Amino acid sequence: MIHTHDRENFFPGRCVLVNGPVIVGAGPSGLAVGAGLKQQGVPFVILERANCIASLWQNHTYDRLKLHLPKQFCQLPYFPFPDNIPEYPTKYQFIDYLESYARHFDINPQFNETVQSAKYDKTCGLWRVKTIESTSGAMRREMVEYICRWLVVATGENAQKVVPEFEGLEEFGGQVMHACDYKSGEAYRGKRVLVVGCGNSGMEVSLDLCHHNAIPSMVVRSSVHVLPREVFGRSTFDLAVLMMKCLPIWLVDKILVVTARLVLGNIEKYGLRRPSIGPLQLKNSEGKTPVLDIGALQKNQIWRYQGGPRHQEVFRRWSRARKRRKS
């Protein structure tokens, strides 16, 4: 929100009446909504806080990233991936696809506009969306209010990084970064790296570190579902979608867990444990996405901890080890 002491840096606001929806976010979801509205001849405005479409993909992903799902599950409406794109596109191929999508449907977001608030005015039945419009290099920024009948929030589920506080971290003394700021393991050749978290990003960052001859270890606090990305050459996600058309979700979950056990073995030997709830049910109830293993599972030293004193001890051990190597 805008603080009082900053108000001298803002121009008086202007008001824009939108004869259609306002869409917040120019990522894949925002672009898809825009294309659908274009197909129906409905005017709209897309507000994007960054200076490009799909800013998270362009600015906050690691170099080796590929889509974890086959391209047919990731393509947007009315515009399939080209045939020459592999089944699992790289991040660069996906970004090119999104930019082609925006050009094809003539979607032109309002860049550098950060939404500060969105309130529904019951009196007139309209939304009031307030933004701060920033111009590159400008000392002052303009406040804009968009008035519209419909509001679409398409900011994604990973728009903000989550950085928990770890007791003992202040004793570590080494470099600390979030996965969204990681690009490549090139700078960590021969170095020991501790990866906190066992989601898809944590697993793939660890694998990338291995490929660059770093020495990664991983700490995992919670139970996690790890599934093979493919079974007998076919996407696990694809198989799950097919099974869910005729089987209840609990049965599909049991089949996925048994299949994962057959393909990956018992993940407890890696220091992990599975949740009692199945992977699809867990995604529905808590939003936790299962990890699709692409080879990282067998390459990591994994430390599992449950919080409390051991939670603190992880960083103290690494701090002591780092000091010993320096001395």
Image: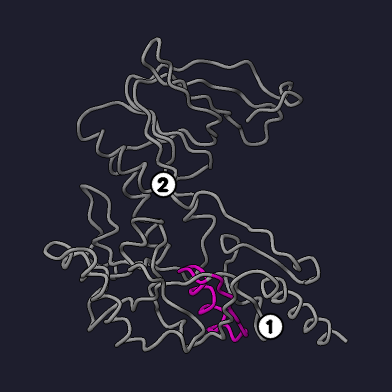
Colour mode? one colour
Of residues 302 and 140, the one nearer the viewer is 302
Residue 208 lies within the magenta run? yes
Q: Residue 107, relative to residue 326: is it above or below?
A: above
* Circle number at residue 191: 1
Q: At 31% from the left edge and 64% from the top edge, which residue is drawn?
A: 280
| Crowd tier of the residue under label 2, counting other residues whose Cα lies within 10 Å: few below 14, some 14–19, many 20 or above | some
Mark 2, residue position: 27
Q: Which contiguous range is marked in magenta?
A: 198-221
Of residues 185 and 83, the one nearer the viewer is 185
Of residues 321 and 183, the one nearer the viewer is 321
Q: Mark 2 and mark 1 in contact? Answer it, CB < 8 Å.
A: no
- The count of marks equals 2
User: In which quadrant is the N terminus drawn?
Assistant: top right
Q: Which one is earlier in the sequence, the residue at label 2 or at label 1?
A: 2
Kindly state the secondary structure of the residue where label 2 is placed.
loop
> For the view shown, which residue lies furthest in the left direction?
246
User: In which quadrant is the C terminus drawn?
Assistant: bottom right
Q: Position of residue 302 (x, y in %)?
A: 56, 82
Q: CA distance from mark 2 to mark 1?
A: 35 Å
| Crowd tier of the residue under label 1, counting other residues whose Cα lies within 10 Å: few below 14, some 14–19, many 20 or above | some
Q: Position of residue 81 (x, y in %)?
A: 25, 59
Horizontal side of 52 relative to 255 (left or right) equals right
Kindly state the secondary structure of the residue where label 1 is placed.
loop
